[in-house]
Image: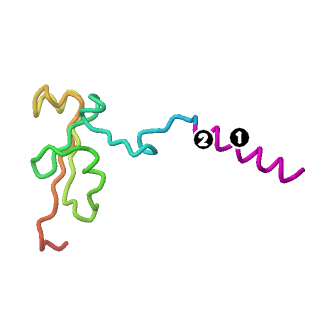
Amino acid sequence: MKKIFFVALLFTTATVFAQTPKTAAAAGHANDAKSDPSMPTYLVDGVETPYAKVVKINTTLIESMNVYKGPEAIAKFGAKYKHGLVLLKLKKAGTKK
């Protein structure tokens, strides 16, 4: 009887997990401007970079990061960045701190 109960419980659990909608992170879905227009723009060393690549950057390689939101981003950089702008500057090769 215990064996039947265990198999039924296992089957029920598997069914529930299979029907649960996955979050973007769990599904391996990369948030970027194309999939979510309200995401900020990421510039890495002046080059627009998708969010999926930004999150893969080794944090020890980041020299500085500046975040601009809302009106501040629009005032400094223009309406294109109305959802925000994240500026990342990477360390130069051979630079030690």
Magenta-span inclusion, residue 69 = no
Kind of residue at badge 1: Thr
Q: Which residue is mark 2?
A: 17
In three-dimensional space, the C-alpha distance between marks 2 and 1, rounded to whole angstroms, equals 9 Å
55 left or right of 87?
right
95 left or right of 54?
left
Kind of residue at badge 2: Phe
Secondary structure type for disc 1: helix
Nearest the eye: 92 or 8: 8
Nearest the eye: 67 or 30: 30
- Residue 53: give x, y in percent of width and height: 25, 50
Nearest the eye: 12 or 81: 12
Magenta-span inclusion, residue 10 = yes
45 left or right of 37?
left
- Residue 52: give x, y in percent of width and height: 28, 47
Which region shows up in magenta? 1-18
Relative to 39, is 8 above or below?
below
Mark 1 surroundings within 10 Å by alpha-carbon count, few (fewer than 14), some (14 through 19), many (20 or more): few
In terms of secondary structure, what is the magenta stretch mainly? Answer: helix
Mark 2 surroundings within 10 Å by alpha-carbon count, few (fewer than 14), some (14 through 19), many (20 or more): few
Residue visible at 29% across and 56% down in the picture: 56
Secondary structure type for disc 2: helix
- Residue 20: give x, y in percent of width and height: 56, 35
- Which label number is shown at residue 12? 1
Residue visible at 76% across and 45% down in the picture: 9
- Which label number is shown at residue 92? none
Q: The C terminus is located in which quarter? A: bottom left
Residue visible at 23% across and 34% down in the picture: 84
The colour mode here is rainbow
Residue visible at 20% across and 38% down in the picture: 41
